[in-house]
Image (cartoon, grey):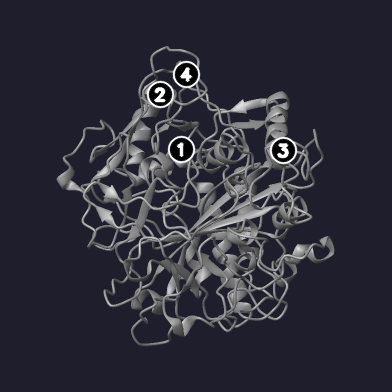
């Protein structure tokens, strides 16, 4: 472990899961998990924690920069528990959003309404396609109408695909994204395929993005009075963007939180991104998935420009799933800005049954332990090649020299012919890259056999502690089971790390670390934080620094065209080459070209003009449809 060559070789062995026992040993370290902070499930502790490792005093001890990975994992779980508490607001009834119920217990199956985070405003309710946000009131005392019942209004009128659903209560879950930020589409082959149903792509995993009251009030408050040219819910004014860019360049840090002349969200801002898919009859009966009524979007009768919506059915106790489908939550991102983490804290969770082998075995258990002693994948995977470019003129854009190839050997990156693409009839996850002028495989479906970086032991320990706490709470209140026992934390990012690349070799740009881990020495799975159903292709699983500047590029690279390292995140008087979720939000939110959104991509992008609809596979990849969010 002291030799760099040995570390690279061992990392390659771990990355293809040939020796899970060795992988577990590498991720373990004496002392980790011996003093794990408690994870609590109780009615007295159902508020979302607003700081990691308190008390935080600037320039002194405490706060995220001084937290341990175990503390960060416990913080992430406390967020998850509070945000998944049943909410006060109910379908079709006026109620206070973001507010946990005092009458419903955590995991109570009799409380079928939304959870706390599901009552957050959908991004189209904050950044409307047309007019003011729905329910807007020009009064800070009423949070600018934040608590209005959900409405999803786009530039084009969207009617119900089935006229019988026209007057249904509007669901809290609005799935108006169909791809992974324009890089690929994600599918679950074990989702039920019902050719007579209204879902034109039943294997497709669909997404949403929401934000809490704090963000909405900030955006709406900076947009008052309506009718003027300063509507942040449409587009942050150019002068504010320029002021923000100047501040970032001169201070190398975010502007003061809550600024009205620069973009800097208040502390306590929370955003969530969630992935959902239809469930099979056996999955519905298993009780392992959180289920909810959702709204998703289609093109009526193949109309290339029109849109209509479908509201899914409520979970049925028996019988076949209805045509609209019963939908389950398969992934949840939570990001929060705190006083000690102005760059946001990023936590990501998955349902336990996402990763399956070709014969339907679970690759990991509910805590994240590897179950399957898999050999090198027989179905093709992507392999990232990111060579350092030759010296050239100085340029702030990343290099276009990176490439991604299809292979069954992620150690040597030898390519496979395209006729070995994944068979979509099996039980596994698979994805299909968006293709264009970029060197990535896009001629077919690519199977997902494992994640790029294993879940480390400190997260596995936190998952065990959380599941134990949930079981004890359920037993205490006579609740037989709850789906939250089958969700697990993947990892959490809580400090920006400036990756140091010591060798200019093709694979020298991959981040490496050794235990004991800390805020400033994160595990690889923390540095490259990603969710297997939200950031699935190789470029997203190993995102750091930036993307190739080609149009529609999907190739992650660490280099500028002059051979210097590309940076993406301002913090603490430095510019960092951060990876994973934080690095992406830094590149696309804080420092997005021609825009500024703090670390919020939905704020940087602004108004949402349409709901996304499924792309239909073509011979060379996915057809192109307008997208709500893309990488630049």
For marks 3 and 2, give the one nearer the viewer.
3
The residue where tag 3 is placed is: 240
Name the element at disc 2: loop
Mark sitting earlier along the chain (4/1) = 4
Q: What residue sits right under mark 2 in the picture?
A: 508
User: Which residue bears the numbered disc 4?
Assistant: 502
The residue that mark 1 highlights is 543
- Asked whether, in this view, residue 162 is left or right of residue 62, the answer is left
**Secondary structure under the numbered disc 1 in the rendered image:** loop
Nearer to us of marks 2 and 1 is: 1
Closer to the camera in the image, 349 or 173 = 173
Dot 4 and dot 1 residues touching (CB under 8 Å):
no
Kind of element beneath mark 4:
loop
Asked if labels 3 and 1 touch by Cβ distance under 8 angstroms, the answer is no
Q: Earlier in the sequence, mark 2 or mark 1?
A: 2
CB under 8 Å between discs 2 and 1: no
Near mark 3 (Cα within 10 A), the count class, few <14, some 14-19 or many ≥20, is some
The answer to whether residue 579 of the structure is visible from this angle is yes
Find residue 462 and report its image quarter. bottom right
Left or right, 471 with respect to 404, comes to right
The percent coordinates of residue 345 (x first, y second) are 63, 46
Distance between the alpha carbons at the discs numbered 4 and 1: 18 Å
> Disc 3 versus disc 4: distance between alpha carbons?
38 Å
């Amino acid at each position: 472990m002291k030799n760099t060559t040995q570390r690279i070789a061992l990392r390659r062995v771990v990355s293809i899961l040939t020796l899970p026992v060795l992988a577990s040993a590498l991720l373990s370290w004496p002392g980790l998990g011996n003093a794990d902070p408690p994870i609590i499930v109780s009615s007295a502790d159902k508020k979302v924690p607003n700081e990691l490792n308190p008390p935080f005093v600037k320039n002194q001890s405490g706060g995220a920069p001084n937290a341990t990975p175990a503390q960060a994992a416990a913080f992430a779980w406390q967020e998850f528990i509070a945000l998944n508490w049943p909410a006060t607001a109910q379908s079709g009834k006026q109620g206070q959003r973001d507010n946990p119920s005092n009458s419903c217990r955590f995991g109570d199956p009799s409380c079928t309404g939304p959870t706390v985070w599901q009552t957050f405003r959908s991004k189209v309710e904050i950044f409307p396609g047309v007019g003011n946000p729905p329910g807007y009131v020009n009064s800070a005392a009423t949070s600018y109408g934040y608590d209005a019942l959900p409405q999803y209004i786009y530039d084009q009128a969207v009617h119900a695909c089935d006229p019988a659903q026209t007057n249904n209560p509007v669901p809290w879950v609005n799935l108006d994204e169909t791809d992974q930020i324009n890089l690929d589409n994600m599918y679950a082959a074990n989702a039920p395929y019902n050719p007579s149903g209204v879902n034109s792509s039943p294997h497709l995993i669909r997404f949403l993005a929401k934000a809490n009251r704090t963000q909405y009030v900030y955006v709406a408050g900076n947009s008052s009075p309506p009718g003027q040219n300063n509507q942040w819910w449409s587009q942050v004014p150019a002068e504010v963007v320029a002021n923000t860019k100047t501040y970032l360049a001169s201070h190398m840090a975010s502007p003061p939180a809550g600024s009205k002349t620069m973009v800097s969200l208040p502390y306590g801002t929370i955003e969530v991104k969630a992935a959902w898919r239809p469930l099979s009859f056996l999955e519905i009966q298993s009780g392992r998935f959180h289920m909810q009524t959702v709204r998703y979007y289609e093109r009526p009768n193949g109309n290339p420009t029109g849109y209509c919506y479908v509201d899914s059915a409520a979970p049925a106790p028996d019988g076949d799933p209805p045509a609209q489908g019963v939908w389950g939550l398969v992934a949840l991102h939570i990001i929060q800005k705190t006083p000690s983490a102005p760059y946001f804290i990023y936590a990501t969770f998955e349902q336990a049954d996402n990763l399956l082998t070709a014969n339907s075995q679970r690759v990991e258990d509910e805590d994240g332990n590897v179950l399957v002693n898999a050999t090198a994948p027989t179905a093709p995977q992507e392999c990232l090649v990111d060579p350092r470019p030759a010296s050239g003129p100085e340029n702030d854009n990343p290099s276009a020299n990176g490439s991604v190839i299809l292979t069954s050997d992620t150690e040597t990156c030898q390519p496979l012919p395209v006729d070995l693409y994944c068979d979509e009839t099996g039980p596994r996850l698979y994805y299909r890259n968006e293709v264009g002028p970029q060197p990535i495989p896009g001629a077919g479906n690519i199977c997902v056999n494992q994640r790029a970086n294993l879940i480390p032991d400190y997260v596995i320990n936190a998952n065990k502690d959380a599941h134990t706490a949930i079981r004890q709470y359920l037993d205490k209140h006579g609740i037989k089971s709850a789906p939250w026992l089958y969700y697990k934390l993947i990892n959490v990012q809580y400090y920006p790390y400036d990756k140091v690349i010591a060798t200019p070799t093709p694979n020298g740009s991959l981040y490496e670390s050794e235990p004991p881990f800390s805020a400033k020495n994160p595990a690889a799975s923390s540095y490259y934080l990603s969710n297997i159903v939200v950031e699935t292709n190789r470029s997203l699983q190993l995102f750091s620094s930036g993307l190739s500047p080609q149009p529609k590029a999907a190739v992650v690279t660490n280099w500028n065209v002059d051979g210097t390292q590309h940076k993406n995140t301002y913090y603490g008087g430095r510019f960092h080459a951060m990876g994973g979720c934080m690095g992406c939000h830094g590149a696309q939110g804080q420092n997005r070209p021609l825009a500024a959104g703090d670390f919020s991509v939905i704020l940087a992008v602004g108004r949402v003009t349409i709901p996304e609809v499924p792309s239909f596979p073509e011979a060379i990849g996915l057809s192109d449809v307008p997208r709500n969010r893309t990488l630049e």
